[in-house]
Image (spheres, helix red, strand yellow):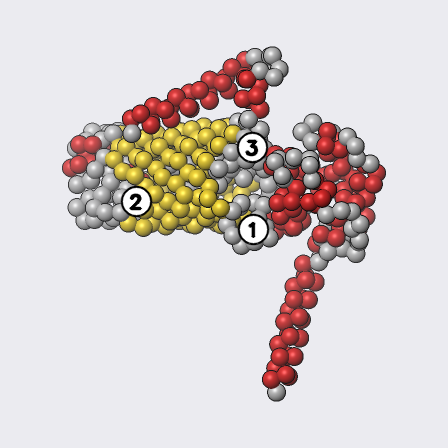
Amino acid sequence: MRGWRSAFLALICTTSFSTTSFADEPAQASGSMLDKGMAMFDSGKLLATGGVSNVEGAGGGGLATWALISGYGSRDGIGVNGHFTYINTTDYAMWTEGVAIGLFDRVELSYARQTFDTQKIGGALGLGDGFKIDQDIWGAKVKIIGDAVYDQDSWIPQVAAGVQYKHNDRGFLVNLLGAKSDGTDYYVSATKVFLAQSLLLNATWRETKANEFGLLGFGGGKHDDYSAQFEGSAAYLFTRKFAVGAEFRTKPDNIGVREQDAWDVFAAYFFTKNISVTAAYVDLGNVLVGEQRGEYVSVQVGL
Amino acid sequence: MNFAKLALAVSFTSFAFTGAARADDMLWQDLGGVDAIHKIAVDTADNFLADPRIKATFDNTNMDRFKILLGDQFCVVAGGPCTYTGRNMKDTHKGLHLGNADFNAVVEDLEKAMDKNGVSYATQTRLLARLAPMQHDIVTK
């Protein structure tokens, strides 16, 4: 696993490096390997059709994962993007930064680091005010069939399957809760754009052991095995730049702390293919001490 | 008796289909009528020629004829009272080795032309929804 992670990091670094050097030396030595490489970033997809980066760094909405492949690379190209998301709920704060690469509109590789700030609750629980839990999420997604946008003459959605490996850096804490620090989620997503109705619908089936997305570890004394969870999204496109939608995501209660389902309503604005902003009102349900509701803001930049 | 039932079912079904088709066929009017659709086609074709991503594709094209055919095609696809006399999409694009990025460039140029002609987004997507499946015949790369 460590080797795979290093290879993944190297890939991301290489991508960011070549991107940077392109910006510094435009149009030098035409026909060079670098130019050919940069031509791979073809921005060949239509605006908004890569979705945005969701809370786990995968292409999706806010809480839900979609079958769309992140970024604007067409099936002959590559897209890469980075994102920062901040969530402020009743008692906690959480932020995520991550990168995603879309390869040939077929494969998506993503990495995100979540930080969960317990703020005053940490003090109340004896962990100290502002106690933070970090989680790394490594994701891979493959489009299996269909095209969410072009197949307007059929009911078949775009279907993708994915895997997310998650590592929680507070092993001692999640062990105290009866959970483990590492977990792997498996999911299948189906996404369809009903263009004539300006509507996007998504449904995702996820097999997971994660407690609060993994921020409270994986498995627990009440239920220690995988369970099937559901993510649903509906979005209406007011213009090709502006979408408004709602999402729902179920979560298991493995530890026995009355973990509840989450939902959000969101608005996403795509300024260009290089920058988009998502704002949402999110309800994560009860997280240890009460219902957590609040604002969600996410900025995404990409090539 | 059975025949009467069958006839009733057939007439009801065809009535339902006609109703659906008629509602659907309002699109050409929502786009502004036959002349407005041809204006959109002319602007779209002009956008193609100004688009560095795809303009080379039209190097050997008679653009005056192309503009009329494109307008006729949009009009027919939108259910309007026009006749498309051009070749089908598969034959027209054979050997051009167009990629998805090229197809999407065309979509963006059409969107720009519809914006310019004051077509609402909801109407634009109705036309785009009918054109989108042509991707299967046009993109061969």
Residue A87: name its quadrant: top left
Q: Nearer the viewer, residue B113 or B140?
A: B140
Q: Are marks 2 and 3 in contact (CB under 8 Å)?
A: no
Q: Are marks 1 and 3 in contact (CB under 8 Å)?
A: no
Instruction: Return the disc, 2 or 3, that comes first in the chain's sequence.
Output: 3
**SS at mark 2?**
strand
The amino acid pointed to by label 1 is: Phe
**Along the line of sight, the residue nearer the viewer: B19 or A128:** B19
Q: Which secondary structure lies at badge 3?
A: loop
Disc 2 target residue:
A208
Q: Which residue is found at the position 30% from the left and 44% from the top?
A: A208
Q: Residue A178's spot in the image, x, y percent? A: 17, 41
Kindly identify the residue that appears in the image at 43 percent across and 50 percent down.
A203
3D distance between C-alphas at marks 2 and 3: 33 Å
Identify the disc placed on residue A76: 3
Write down the residue under mark 1.
A194
Q: Is residue A197 left or right of residue A184?
A: right
Question: Which residue is drawn at the image coordinates 57% and 21% (left, top)?
Answer: A36
How many numbered marks does the figure carry? 3
